[in-house]
Amino acid sequence: MLSKLSSYQAGTLGELITVAKLNTLGLAAYISPEGAPGHDVMVVVDGLPRSIEVKTRQFLNRPTEITRWPVDLDRKGEADFFVFIELDLRTMSPTFYVLTNAQARERHRDYVGAGNCYLPAVRDIVKPNDFSVFAHANHSGDPVLCNAVN
């Protein structure tokens, strides 16, 4: 019978698949060392290192089993980007939601001792598996719209 991974296993797997996905997109990315201060993944965007906080949630039958991604902005709020993953355990297929820091803060709901980003609120502002935010980012991690000038 299929069962869920431990939160530690799911977290590590999420970091690994995030790095693999970013590398396949041509971005230089690596997992931060275990236990190191900071964020889960580092990626080079426009020649600068950017930090990513990765949150992985898993489901056995339907994505609706996932209701939230816990986010502690007091500890992890300086990340340039947040990657929220829905992991289908039947097929080991990830669905990625990539948010800038500003987007994650906008969708974060605080409560005593922690906080969450809820799935419907995240889906309202980003498309699944859209990594275009990494194409051009300014220092704050917010997207920069570029217009070519001839």
Image: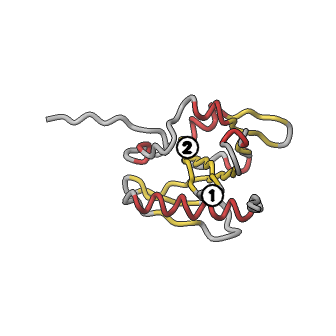
Q: Position of residue 14 (x, y in %)?
A: 61, 59
Is residue 79 rendered to the left or right of residue 66?
Answer: left
Q: Eyeballing the image, is 5 above or below 79?
A: below
Image quadrant assignment for residue 89:
bottom right
On residue 97, which mark appears? 2
Rate crowding at label 2 as few (under 14), some (14 to 19) or many (20 or more) other CA atoms within 10 Å.
many
Q: Position of residue 72 (x, y in %)?
A: 74, 46
Is there any visible trace of residue 62 in the rendered image?
A: yes
Q: Nearer the viewer, mark 1 or mark 2?
A: 2
Q: Eyeballing the image, is 84 above or below 112?
A: below
Residue shown at 67% from the left, 70% from the top: 34
Is residue 131 rendered to the left or right of residue 35?
Answer: left
Q: Which residue is mark 1?
A: 39
On residue 103, which mark appears? none
Q: As shown in the figure, which amino acid type bears the numbered disc 2?
A: Tyr
Of helix, strand and loop, which one carries label 2? strand
Ranked by sequence position, the earlier of labels 1 and 2 is 1
Which one is nearer the viewer's eye here, 24 or 50? 24
Image quadrant assignment for residue 132:
top left
Is there any visible trace of residue 138 in the rendered image?
A: no
Residue shown at 63% from the left, 57% from the top: 39
Residue shown at 58% from the left, 33% from the top: 123
Q: As shown in the figure, which amino acid type bears the numbered disc 1?
A: His
Q: Eyeballing the image, is 75 above or below 15?
A: above
Of helix, strand and loop, which one carries label 1? loop
Image quadrant assignment for residue 45:
bottom left
Rate crowding at label 1 as few (under 14), some (14 to 19) or many (20 or more) other CA atoms within 10 Å.
many
Quadrant of the snapshot with the C terminus: top left
